[in-house]
Each structure stands twice: as C-alpha cells, then as structure tokens.
Image (cartoon, rainbow, N blue to C red):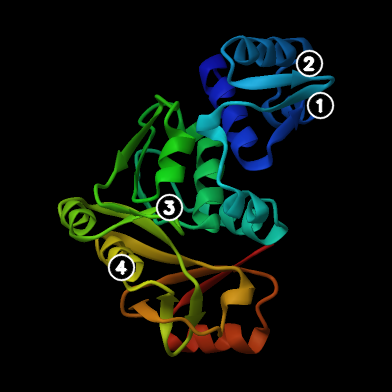
Amino acid sequence: MKRAARLAAILDLLAVDGEVTVDDLVERFGASAATTRRDLDSLAEQRLLTRTHGGAVAHSVAYELPVRYKSHLRTRQKESIARAAAALVSPGMVVGLSGGTTTTAIAAALAARPDLTEGPGITIVTNAVNIAAQLATRPDIKVVVTGGVIHSRSYELVGPFVEQLLRGVRLDVAFIGVNAVDPADGARTDDEREAAVNSVMAQRAQRAVIVADSSKVGAGSFASIGGADLFQTLITDDGLPSAMRDEFTSAGYRVIVAD
C-alpha cells in the first residue's frame, strides 16, 4: 500500500475505534514497525491524532463521530456486516450510503481496502454528514454529498433537495441502513423523511442492499422504505434465526449472513 493510502487508512481506523496500536497497524498493512511509527509521527505533526506509548488516539474534530454513533460502531455485528458489504464493492463502482451506524462502519471498511483506493477508485454518494466528514480527507475516494436539511437525530440530510440530486445519478450499489426489516413489511425507518430519501437512493441503484443487525429483524417501525420489489439483498449477522432466514428467502431476498 502506498504511503498516502496507508496514512488515510490509519485515520479511518481511528474514526471507528478511537485508538490504534503499532502492532495492529503492522499486521493490517504489512509495513515495518519503524515505518508505522513514522506514519503516526507524521500524522501527529499535522495534529490529526495524538501519539501514545505503542500507538495513537483520535485527535481531530473532523474525525470525532457523534457519541450516539461511537457507542455502537465497535460491536461485532456491525463490523461483520460492514466487511460483508464491502466485499460486494469492486474498483470503479459508484456506491450509495444512507445514514446510520452500520453504513458508517461500511464507509470505514471501504476506505480501508487498498484495492478500492488505487487505480479507478470508487465514488461514494451519501446524505450522511458524518460519513462525508469521515471521508473528507481521502483524495483517493470521490465523495458526493447531497443537499438538504440536516436531521439532528440521525445526521442525515433529508428533503426534496436530496431526492432531486439522487434522481440525477446512477449507483452501482446502495447500502441502506434501517430501523426495522421484516419479510412481509420490508425495510422501515422511524422518520418518514429519511424513508423517502432512502427509497429514492435504493431506486437509483442497480443493486439495493438492506444492512441491518439481527435485532432489527421483525421489529416494527413507522415509515416504509420498500420491500423485495426494491431490495434484492439483506445483509445481517449470525443472530438471524434460520426460520426467519427462510422467510426472507421465500419473500425474494438474497440473505447474506455475516460472520
């Protein structure tokens, strides 16, 4: 991995975990311990992180996720879903990301893949301001941010401006975070404005994917995003009961269980 991509990937890891160690970075990127320490020192000089004994902790405000996101991002389920989602993306793709804790983890997983940050790269279209901030210093990833009115609870941009922009683009794949998903009712969210934007984003994608940990399966929520006629795939974790998986499959979904 080139040095610029490695430095950016270190910042992405800090955005998710809040801290990194030299040993972990050596294992992830294959650089020597001495090179890794120099990388961390360089980022510390730019005030993008704070060095610690054996590693570093997040420092930049631009990489400090809201507390409501940080409290969830480190869970095993969301991390495994993020890896499974990132595996569906190839270089050169245009990727849609709605707001949410799981899609935020997907953004980090995509940014950490060196094959997606070299050559043709990828384009990410998002209405989530925290995801845009997370990727803002990544010159190797094109980030398109929709307009709209910010929703203070979810950090998503909503409203007609968002929908207008989305209707003018084509996405290869869209990953949509939800508050609830059911084989019969489809994907749902608590806010009708978020649901409207998520639905348009899914419509503009050749492949629309629901990303939801198993606690959201079978739950109820206010506003409908769409069902199997809109979404081809559901990615969830290994907490999904086998009987429920069969129901989703029968309803027309391809179910990917992340491990």
How far apart are the alpha carbons under marks 1 and 4?
Answer: 44 Å
Residues at marks 1 and 4 touching, judged by CB atoms closer than 8 Å:
no
The residue carrying mark 2 is 33
Residue depth check, mark 1 versus mark 3: number of the one nearer the observer: 3
Residues at marks 2 and 1 touching, judged by CB atoms closer than 8 Å:
yes
Residue depth check, mark 2 versus mark 4: number of the one nearer the observer: 4
Could you classify mark 1 by the number of other residues whose Cα lies within 10 Å: few (under 14), some (14-19), or many (20 or more)?
few
- Which amino acid type corresponds to the residue marked 2 in the rendered image? Ala
Residues at marks 1 and 3 touching, judged by CB atoms closer than 8 Å:
no
- Which amino acid type corresponds to the residue marked 1 in the rendered image? Asp
Relative placement, left or right, of 167 versus 34 is: left
The residue carrying mark 4 is 193
The residue carrying mark 3 is 155
Residue 47 appears anywhere in the view: yes
- Which one is in front, 237 or 224? 224
Q: Is residue 108 above or below residue 221?
A: above
The residue carrying mark 1 is 23
How far apart are the alpha carbons under marks 3 and 4?
Answer: 13 Å
- Which one is in front, 175 or 101? 101
Q: Secondary structure at mark 4?
A: helix
Q: Residue 185 occupies which quadrant of the picture?
A: bottom left
Q: Secondary structure at mark 3?
A: loop
